[in-house]
Image (cartoon, rainbow, N blue to C red):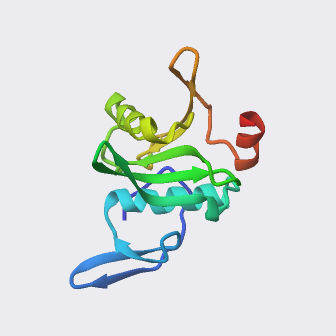
Amino acid sequence: MWQLNLPEYNFRIKKQNEKHLIFDSQRKRYVSLTPEEWVRQHFIRFLIEAKGYPAALIAVEKQLNMNGMKKRCDAILYDREAKPVMIIEFKAPNVTIIQETFDQVAVYNAKLRVDLFIISNGIEHYCCKVNAETAQYEFFSEIPDFNSLFVTKM
């Protein structure tokens, strides 16, 4: 598969009608194995297994209705009161993360109103907080553990 800058994990993969599928434990079903999906599966496992994010608080492919248009967030992290706190956006490993990627997250954020983002293509990972006063991104030096994220947030 694709080489990522993330720990290696074992996944259930099968071939059906000449198409590779990967089991998504969040959605509890097999989904098409695209390069972006490979990143999503690895990164979500990384968040859960290495950073302590509760699987139950991560929603995958969450649909948003925005001005009559349907948009879909790659993942949303919720707090224990079911309030969205972070948008997580994934790109394929060959897609460079540029300002446009952050702008895409900002569009989702018009609806969700969170101040934390993670953007990853599996090679590069960005975690940032929006400074409400300056409207600038403040980048974390690494992806924070779940518990430390909420200590600084609450």
Q: Residue at x 37, y 65 (%)?
A: 1
Position of residue 81 relative to residue 24, above or below, is: above
- The reply, left or right, for residue 77 in relation to residue 72 is right
Residue furthest front in the image: 68
Position of residue 3 relative to residue 56, above or below, is: above
Q: List x then y, in percent, for residue 154.
A: 75, 37
Position of residue 113 relative to residue 20, above or below, is: above
- The reply, left or right, for residue 130 in relation to residue 148 is left
Nearer to the camera, 124 or 116: 116
- The reply, left or right, for residue 131 in relation to residue 31 is right
How many marks on residues?
0
Nearer to the camera, 64 or 11: 64
Q: Residue at x 31, y 63 (%)?
A: 34
Nearer to the camera, 141 or 71: 71
Residue furthest top in the image: 134
Q: Residue at x 54, y 67 (%)?
A: 9
Q: List x then y, in percent, for residue 135.
A: 51, 19
Q: List x then y, in percent, for residue 102.
A: 40, 33
Position of residue 73 relative to residue 67, above or below, is: below
Q: Residue at x 36, y 31 (%)?
A: 103
- The reply, left or right, for residue 19 in relation to residue 140 is left
